[in-house]
């Protein structure tokens, strides 16, 4: 027999000999369990919305072969939905609840006694030297009271060649009419070497726009004399401690009084420039220059003293 016919015969005999062994190894398995039932729905037609996934054994599922892109997750029930209403609704607050939460406050329990504050500012305490001589000058103000009502005290004066040329003291009631302005009403007492004079005073003072410190006061004296005095000054901060202060002051009278050296109209104008150094906010020495000029009849009464330029040096402090 040829070798080509012998090879197929030997292969057929090998398969027949292995068949009983294969059948014996699978004799304990029910192969019908793996076959789908006759009335089973094809996989493509399975309605997952009707399946109870909570009873499925997800550990035995092979998720690597599942097509998650084709699954409709909107119809899957992944658990019990959260309740929209509390199990025990919160009752609406009653008047008794509000009364217990906010008990009535006894009258006067939250009232505080008015606080009393005070301030003394010596704005200028200086020595001056001009072409008509030398001397000293001062200007100071202070107050005591609360935020609205205060008692103001103001004083100013000048000495020349050891002689007091002018001095005055004012006592005024001040009331705040805005966060930046006070109205003042009171009296002024002038002291002179020859005589003294009492004035009724009314005025206003405060901080004008752009931080200009301003004051204007009208005085009514005996004999029907009226005088008005206005002052404005401004602080220019060159550094945190070095401050330049320009000042302008003017005085006007309603009638002539030769015995007091007062002429009608514009009496006197003073312009000054002072540079101070604040070692602290309460104490500051300064140097500067001041120019005074009298006008009209007041200049005639003053004679050679109608105009003067002075060098000044002094201190500014407050308590």
Image: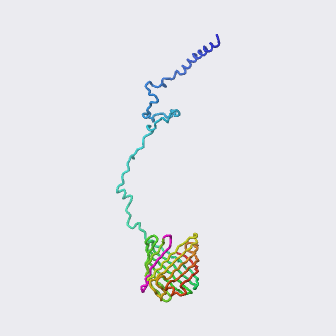
Q: Residue at x 63, y 13 (%)?
A: 4
User: In the displayed image of the protein, which residue is found farthest to the front?
Assistant: 296
In terms of depth relative to the viewer, which is nearer, 93 or 38?
38
Q: Is residue 242 visible?
A: yes
Colour scheme in use: rainbow
Q: Position of residue 267 (x, y in %)?
A: 49, 83
Q: Is residue 203 magenta?
A: no
The N terminus appears in which quarter of the rendering? top right
Residue 218 lies within the magenta run = yes
The one of 313 and 43 positioned closer to us in this rendering:
313
In this rendered view, identify the residue nearer to me: 243 or 49. 243
Q: In which image quadrant can residue 246 be found?
A: bottom right
Q: Is residue 196 left or right of residue 245?
A: left
Please provide percent x and percent y for residue 58: 49, 34
Q: Name the residue at the top extreme.
A: 1
The vertical placement of 44 against 122, above or below, is above
- Residue 30 visible in the displayed image: no
Classify 245 as above or below 24: below
Q: Is 192 above or below relative to 107?
A: below
Q: Which residues are magenta?
A: 209-225
Q: Is residue 52 above or below residue 239?
A: above
| x then y, percent, for residue 41 | 44, 28
Q: Residue at x 46, y 71 (%)?
A: 180
Give the total of numbered labels.
0
Hey, which residue is sitting farthest left in the picture?
A: 95
Q: Position of residue 241 (x, y in %)?
A: 58, 71
Q: Name the residue at 42% across, 42% down.
A: 81
């Amino acid at each position: 027999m040829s070798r080509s016919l012998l090879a197929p015969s030997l292969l057929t005999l090998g398969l027949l000999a292995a068949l009983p062994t294969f059948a014996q190894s699978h004799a304990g398995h029910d192969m019908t369990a793996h076959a789908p039932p006759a009335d089973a729905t094809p996989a493509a037609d399975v309605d997952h919305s009707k399946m109870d996934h909570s009873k499925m054994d997800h550990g035995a599922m092979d998720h690597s072969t599942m097509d998650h892109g084709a699954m409709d997750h909107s119809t899957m029930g992944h658990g019990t939905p959260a309740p929209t209403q509390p199990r025990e609704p919160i009752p609406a607050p009653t008047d008794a609840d509000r009364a217990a939460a906010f008990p009535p406050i006894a009258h006067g329990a939250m009232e505080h006694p008015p606080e009393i504050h005070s301030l003394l500012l010596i704005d200028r305490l200086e020595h001056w030297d001009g072409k008509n001589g030398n001397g000293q000058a001062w200007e100071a103000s202070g107050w005591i009271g609360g935020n609205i009502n205060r008692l103001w005290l103001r004083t100013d004066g000048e000495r020349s060649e050891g002689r007091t040329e002018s001095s005055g003291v004012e006592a005024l009631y001040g009331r705040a009419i805005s966060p930046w302005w006070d109205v003042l009403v009171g009296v002024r007492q002038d002291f002179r070497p020859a005589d003294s004079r009492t004035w009724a005073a009314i005025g206003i003072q405060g901080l004008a726009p752009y931080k200009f410190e301003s004051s204007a006061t009208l005085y009514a004296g005996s004999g029907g004399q009226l005088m008005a005095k206005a002052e404005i000054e401004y602080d220019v901060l060159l550094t945190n401690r070095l401050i330049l202060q320009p000042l302008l002051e003017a005085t006007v009278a309603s009638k002539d009084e030769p015995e007091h050296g007062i002429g009608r109209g514009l009496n006197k104008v003073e312009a000054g420039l002072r540079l101070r150094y604040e070692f602290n906010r309460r104490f500051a020495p300064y140097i500067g220059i001041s120019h005074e000029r009298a006008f009209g009849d007041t200049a005639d009464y003053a004679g050679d003293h109608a105009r003067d330029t002075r060098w000044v040096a002094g201190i500014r402090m407050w308590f």
